[in-house]
Image (spheres, rainbow, N blue to C red):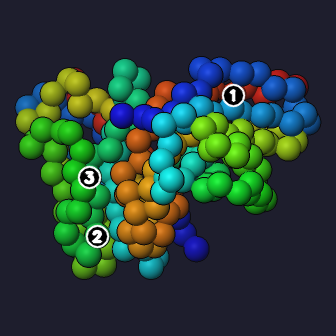
Amino acid sequence: DAKTTQPPSMDCAEGRAANLPCNHSTISGNEYVYWYRQIHSQGPQYIIHGLKNNETNEMASLIITEDRKSSTLILPHATLRDTAVYYCIVRTYDDYKLSFGAGTTVTVRA
Amino acid sequence: KAGVTQTPRYLIKTRGQQVTLSCSPISGHRSVSWYQQTPGQGLQFLFEYFSETQRNKGNFPGRFSGRQFSNSRSEMNVSTLELGDSALYLCASSLDRVFGEQYFGPGTRLTVT
């Protein structure tokens, strides 16, 4: 069962930052926060993951609150190609099964 | 480096038939997982293979099975197909079981009529 709660949908203007929230209030100390996205009819794509520090890569930034009960994925300059379903997943590093919830459908508008 | 490939991309079968789907992981990746995606249930984990052994299994009936070959390529088989097996079947590969990131293929769209 998914251990995260995400809003079902959100809109974002092209060129603006998209901030995607995720609630994981029952996260345990050895569980990481992972983000994947799935563009229509394609396989999910890994975005980023973190344990407790904020993380940044070429795709996005991940901000995890100090109590680790929630996080925010930031797409700094959203493009139309970022329109997708975004999944926030909590898992231990060696828990190979990914438990996907319903995710957030992000629509980037021109 | 080539990504995860899955064949065939589309498949139409009749109830009661069986089907075999194939997945070739990224070169050097040794772990392969399979997922089923349907509009009603979303993405659900089927099973994971590493070093030719099934290491994890999701909550699916025994009609769903798989195997992994010595070159890490994997196949999954569904016997006695039911209408509810219509789904997108996704394969994901990972360098190692504890490495973290999984890379997904484009999927096989199975339609059971």
Q: CA distance from mark 3 to mark 2?
A: 10 Å
Q: In the image, are marks 2 and 1 on the same chain?
A: no
Q: Tell me which corner region of the image, top left, top right, bottom left or bottom right, holds residue A110.
A: top right
Residue occupying the point 27% across, 64% down:
B49
Mark 1 is on which residue type?
A: Val
Label of residue B47 in the image: 3
Q: Residue at 14% across / 33% down in the picture?
A: B81
Label 1: how many Cα within 10 Å (few below 14, some 14–19, many 20+): many
- Name above or below for residue A18 compared with residue A32: above
Q: Position of residue B100 (x, y in %)?
A: 49, 63
Q: Quadrant of residue B56?
A: bottom left
Tag 2 residue: B50
Element type at mark 1: strand
Q: Are marks 3 and 1 on the same chain?
A: no
Chain bearing tag 1 is A
| Residue type marked 3 | Phe
Residue at x 42%, y 34% (from the top left corner): A2
In the image, which disc is placed on residue A106? 1
